[in-house]
Amino acid sequence: QAAYIAIDIVEARVLRGTPAAPPSAAAPPDDAVARALSSTGHVQLSGVRFVSGSAEFEQGARLALAGVAQYLQAQPEVRLYVVGHTDVSGELEGNLELSRERAQAVVDALVHDFGVAAGRISAHGVGPLAPWADNQSSAGRARNRRVELVRHRVGVIKSAAGRYALRSKDR
């Protein structure tokens, strides 16, 4: 059975200005998660960090994950993509796999430790393909190593080519 990922480009532009702050040990309060997911459709999990080169959580991740679980409990209609990112260090295929493993670690923790229904969240990895900062400095690479939540969008979407696609809650 073949698998694929479809990506809808909602807005194409060059990111300018100050890059996002590097992940901190403190998780955003769940109201910040809710506000970001409601307004922009995505949020970085700033409290979720991993041991270098692995999908093992560093200390402090549970606090951020608890906030996500609380948000999902309060918003039963919401479904999320969990998207893992890496910097450019290493080979592309290895970074894609590592980013998928890290996203899956977040999904597994939310399902097994916090009781989130598995059908509401799915793991995806994009490796170094969507950087927030340059990869030339250690600070930039640190900003690019992150996990984000992206809210599913349901409805009819018009593509850049003018075609329409129905996106269902089951995708």
Image: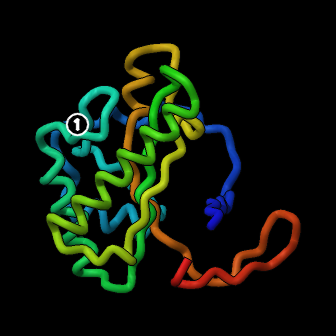
Which quadrant of the view contains residue 129? top right
Quadrant holding the N terminus: bottom right
Q: How many marks?
A: 1
In the rendered image, the vertical position of residue 75 relative to residue 5, given as above or below: below
Q: Give the x, y percent position of residue 167.
A: 63, 80
Amino acid at the residue labelled 1? Ser
Q: Give the x, y percent position of residue 128.
A: 54, 34
Which quadrant of the view contains residue 157? bottom right
Q: Is residue 153 left or right of residue 51?
A: right
Q: How is the image coloured?
A: rainbow
In the rendered image, the vertical position of residue 119 relative to residue 139, given as above or below: below
Taking the spot 26% from the left edge, 36% from the top edge, the residue there is: 50
Which quadrant of the view contains residue 20? top left
In the rendered image, the vertical position of residue 3 relative to residue 153, given as above or below: above
Residue toward you, 56 or 62 = 56
In the rendered image, the vertical position of residue 105 relative to residue 40, given as above or below: above
Q: Disc 1 designates what residue?
A: 24
Q: Is residue 97 left or right of residue 120?
A: right
Q: Is residue 30 left or right of residue 140?
A: left
Q: Give the x, y percent position of residue 131.
A: 53, 35
Q: Give the x, y percent position of residue 163.
A: 85, 75
**Residue lying furthest top:** 137
Q: Residues within 10 Å of mark 1 (few under 14, many from 20)?
A: few
Taking the spot 39% from the left edge, 16% from the top edge, the residue there is: 138
Taking the spot 28% from the left edge, 44% from the top edge, the residue there is: 46
Callout 1: SS:
loop
Q: Is residue 5 left or right of residue 40?
A: right
Quadrant holding the C terminus: bottom right
Taking the spot 38% from the left edge, 40% from the top edge, the residue there is: 146
